[in-house]
């Protein structure tokens, strides 16, 4: 076992990929300096400025350059510093990267990884704190990855780098610096396989990113009251491992979906819809969603703290279901 | 602008003329087939602008990458895309370049280095930059070319891309077809900058403005940029002043501009101009001219027949190519 952080796993996975494959290059604002959190720290020293390319603050062009480079045989990794700024690159991502393969009848491929990070809790205000993954899930052709642990951060980044198409890899800034023991030789994790983080009998909680840990904390608190919670981290939103979720619901008959994004139009709605379509008869109660209120992330610390979905919200949702009987 | 009087070898002149005739006849047929509801969707013809496609693409290799915008049939054909496959694509058939999933605004022929058209104005400019960068990083002498209209220049992505291309010094040649109209609006109503080549001047991009209806002039100016880009230079911008004879799209009532009179068009038409030059230079006589036109007409007949014989794609294709395997 080795101790690492979520961020450290990202850096070491990038370095390993660049060592193994000279087609891999990193582009983004300040990446040669390591970026604001240090995700690309030290890469320029080992791989040089040609492969660790600083760019101007031109998100759309950065993304477009990477798409063109990918179509021409490289394997670029773009860093969009905050997911809030992915809005500036969405035309390129949605209209070009996502569609190139299908629209060309399979002639073009875009092996591109877009790394970005979202999440609130750091007083960043409404334009540096969003969780926008649901927008990406809506676009055919994009895969969407959201790791919640250091081990998965490394393994899923490696899987994303090996994928032949465009993958958006969504990190969470609040997870970057937590230390974690990881296996020295970890098995690869394919995109599209969920992880059952905690086994339980009574209620299934499907949680994304930071809400995985919050849901685990809720589960521990609920265990004291005799409520046994199963926690599932889908890890990739597209493709979604619906089978693991449905298998769990067949045992628990109750489902909570928890994420930090606003509830309205969020990924929880998609999970709820897919589960009811696949296993309506297995549900003893309506699916409950946990998410943020339908409002921009507030700045003032007490307001932001109250806004953020947390373990108490998950626990309350589970309790509302635990009483439901067939 | 007067015709340039630089050298034009007989073989090069004939090759230019063949390509321009091929595009002209092909697009006239596409217009007819659009009205007959055999070609579908939004169709933007480049009739009148063929000298740019022919002058540029005639100098490129298959491993040079070209991108275009929504008015792209001519660029695809000039880059080597077989007309039958282009026509089948425009008809939505399985044997089309993109198996019927792309259509007029999304033509791609990767085998000939045509990485494609896009329906988003200016959207392919950074992609061409990325392909140019990839070529340079992999140690080759390939270049990337992107065709766009003057309407693309007012978009942010254009400025972002020009800045980055100049900063990195990549072998990208920007080819602007300045036909004076962004969709239905004259350039003067969209910007105070008359010449597109002036837009890139502050970035230190090498630039030239030529008469885009003079195929020899386009070829000569592009050849100079191409040689420099192959030798490690770039980026450059070639602005070709041209004229779109037809509306913005097939069906456009064209009420926003004064149409060019037929006799005036005889003077402007890039094909007639090159033919006059060929006659004056002695490399084209009436028989050769007629044969070139006839060959183009035969080729488009064959292309249309091929396309009509191709089936519509199977429904399973819709979801089968969403993700690369």
Image (tube, coloured by chain):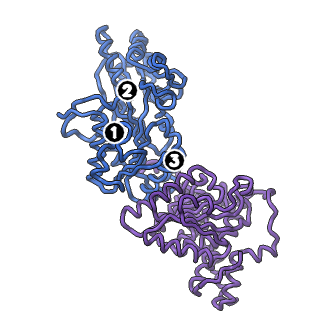
Chain colours: A blue, B purple
Measure the C-alpha gap from mark 1 to mark 2: 20 Å
User: Residue B170 in the image: x percent, y percent?
Assistant: 45, 62
Q: Which residue is mark 3?
A: A60
Q: Please identify the quarter of the rendering in which residue B103 is found.
A: bottom right
- Residue at far left of view: A1
Any mark on residue A210, and which?
2
The secondary element bearing badge 1 is classed as loop
Front of the two marks 3 and 2: 3
- Residue drawn at x 49%, y 27% is A125
Q: Residues within 10 Å of mark 1 (few under 14, many from 20)?
A: some
User: Residue A202 in the image: x percent, y percent?
Assistant: 34, 16
The secondary element bearing badge 2 is classed as helix
Any mark on residue A299, and which?
none
The secondary element bearing badge 3 is classed as helix
In terms of depth relative to the viewer, which is nearer, B263 or A286?
Answer: B263
Measure the C-alpha gap from mark 3 to mark 2: 28 Å
- Residue drawn at x 81%, y 73% is B262
User: Residue B185 in the image: x percent, y percent?
Assistant: 74, 54
**Figure quadrant of the N terminus of chain B:** bottom right
- Do the CB atoms of the residues marked 1 and 2 lie less than 8 Å apart? no
- The reply, left or right, for residue B228 in relation to residue B31 is left
- Dot 3 and dot 2 within a common chain: yes
Measure the C-alpha gap from mark 3 to mark 1: 23 Å
- Dot 1 and dot 2 within a common chain: yes
- Dot 3 and dot 1 within a common chain: yes
In the rendered view, tell whether residue B160 sits above or below residue A246. Answer: below
């Amino acid at each position: 076992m080795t101790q690492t952080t979520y961020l450290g796993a990202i850096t070491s996975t990038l370095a390993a990929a660049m060592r193994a494959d000279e087609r891999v290059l990193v582009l983004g604002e300040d990446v040669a300096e390591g970026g604001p959190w240090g995700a690309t720290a030290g890469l320029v020293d080992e791989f040089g400025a040609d492969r660790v390319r600083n760019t101007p603050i031109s998100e759309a062009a950065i993304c477009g350059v990477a798409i063109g480079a990918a179509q021409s045989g490289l394997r670029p990794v773009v860093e969009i510093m905050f997911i809030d700024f992915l809005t500036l690159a969405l035309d390129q991502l949605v209209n070009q990267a996502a569609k190139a393969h299908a629209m060309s009848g399979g002639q073009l491929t875009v092996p591109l990884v877009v790394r970005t990070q979202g999440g609130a809790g750091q007083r960043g205000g409404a334009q540096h704190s969003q969780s926008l993954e649901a927008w990406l899930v809506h676009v055919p052709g994009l895969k969407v990855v959201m790791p919640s642990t250091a081990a998965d951060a490394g393994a899923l980044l490696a899987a994303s780098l090996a994928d032949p198409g465009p993958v958006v890899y969504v990190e969470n800034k609040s997870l970057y610096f937590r230390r974690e023991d990881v296996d020295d030789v970890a098995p690869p994790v394919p995109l599209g396989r969920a992880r059952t983080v905690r086994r339980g009998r009574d209620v299934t909680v499907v949680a994304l990113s930071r809400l995985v840990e919050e849901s685990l904390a809720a589960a521990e608190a609920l265990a004291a009251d005799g409520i046994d919670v199963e926690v599932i981290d889908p890890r990739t939103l597209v493709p979604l491992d619906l089978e693991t979720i449905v298998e769990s619901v067949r045992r628990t008959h109750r489902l909570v979906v928890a994420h930090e994004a606003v509830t309205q139009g969020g990924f929880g709605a998609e999970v709820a819809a897919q589960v009811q379509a696949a296993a309506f008869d297995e549900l003893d109660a309506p699916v409950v969603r946990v998410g943020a209120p339908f409002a921009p992330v507030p700045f003032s610390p007490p307001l932001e703290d109250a806004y953020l979905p947390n373990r108490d919200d998950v626990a309350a949702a589970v309790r509302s279901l635990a009483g439901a009987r067939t | 602008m007067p015709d340039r009087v630089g050298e034009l070898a007989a073989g090069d002149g004939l090759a230019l003329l063949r390509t321009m005739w091929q595009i002209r006849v092909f697009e006239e047929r596409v217009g007819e087939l659009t009205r007959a509801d055999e070609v579908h969707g939004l169709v933007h013809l480049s009739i009148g602008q063929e000298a740019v496609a022919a002058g540029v693409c005639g100098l490129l290799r298959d491993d040079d990458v070209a991108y275009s915008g929504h008015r792209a049939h001519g660029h695809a054909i000039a880059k080597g895309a077989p007309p039958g496959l282009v026509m089948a694509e425009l008809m939505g058939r399985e044997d089309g370049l993109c198996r019927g999933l792309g259509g007029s605004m999304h033509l791609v022929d990767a085998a000939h280095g045509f990485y494609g058209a896009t329906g988003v104005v200016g959207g392919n400019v950074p992609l061409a930059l990325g392909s140019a960068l990839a070529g340079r990083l992999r140690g080759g002498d390939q270049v990337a070319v992107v065709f766009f209209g003057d309407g693309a220049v007012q978009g942010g992505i254009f400025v972002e891309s020009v800045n980055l291309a100049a900063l990195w010094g990549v072998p990208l040649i920007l080819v602007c077809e300045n036909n004076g109209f962004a969709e239905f609006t004259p350039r003067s109503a969209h910007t105070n900058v008359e010449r597109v080549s002036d837009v890139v001047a502050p970035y230190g991009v090498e630039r030239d403005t030529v008469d885009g209806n003079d195929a020899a002039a386009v070829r000569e100016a592009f050849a100079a940029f191409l040689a420099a880009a192959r030798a490690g230079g770039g980026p450059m911008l070639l602005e070709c002043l041209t004229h779109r004879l037809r509306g913005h799209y097939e069906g456009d009532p064209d009420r926003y501009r004064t149409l060019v009179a037929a006799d005036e068009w005889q003077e402007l038409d890039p094909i007639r101009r090159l033919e006059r030059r060929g006659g004056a230079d002695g490399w084209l006589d009436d028989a050769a001219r007629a044969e070139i036109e006839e060959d183009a007409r035969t080729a488009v007949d064959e292309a249309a027949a091929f396309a009509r014989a191709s089936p519509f794609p199977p429904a399973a294709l819709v979801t089968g190519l969403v993700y690369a395997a």
